[in-house]
Amino acid sequence: MSDYQAPKPTERENAISSGVLAFAGAMLATVGVFQVLAAISALAKDDLYVAGQEYVYQLSLTGWGWIHLVIGGLAIAVGVCLLLGKAWAVLTGAGLAAIGAIVSFAWMPYYPWWSVIIIVFNVVVMWATVTQMNARDRT
């Protein structure tokens, strides 16, 4: 059995890690704002969304509006906590971004380009948080 211990991160690595997590927090909060805006539009029964063909994940616009509102509100809260440096927010942010990407995929028939953009933003948040989990564990 080896007694290997990972080297402690340098000051530069800590600064990069903090910057990436701040980016993830800002992105997650921004995605949350976008989802809240989409929710408001869906809940107001705006003419922006047109229900097309029936598909597997079909819900009413009101249902989708509430789903986006809850996920968006949670994303804003967790994004702010990431910016404040809360350790629990790293894993929670990654999980919430994954859920947000799945919901946006299911929402795709209503507004495809918007859904793709939100999925990309969520994937960037997942990358930023997951890559920094190991760096935070070493400190």
Image (tube, rainbow, N blue to C red):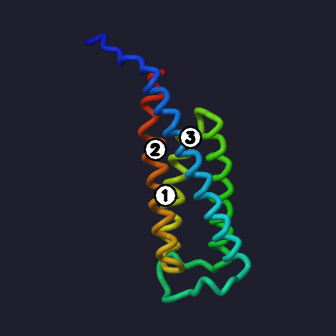
User: Residue lying farthest left?
Assistant: 1
Q: Which residue position is annotated with label 3? A: 22
Q: Residue at x 50, y 86 (%)?
A: 54
Mark positioned earlier in the residue sequence (1 or 2): 1
The disc at residue 121 is 1
Q: Note whether 135 is above or below 69 in the view shown.
A: above
User: Residue lying farthest right?
Assistant: 44
- The spot of residue 16 in percent (x, y) is 46, 33
Which element is circle 3 on? helix
Q: Residue at x 64, y 66 (%)?
A: 67
- The spot of residue 135 in percent (x, y) is 44, 29
Few, some or many residues within 10 Å of mark 1 (<14, 14–19, 20+) = many
Do the residues bearing badges 2 and 3 touch, measured as CB atoms within 8 Å?
no
Q: Residue at x 59, y 39 (%)?
A: 89
Quadrant assignment for the N terminus: top left
CA gap, disc 2 to disc 3? Answer: 9 Å
Which element is circle 2 on? helix
The disc at residue 128 is 2
| In-front residue for pair 20/44 | 20
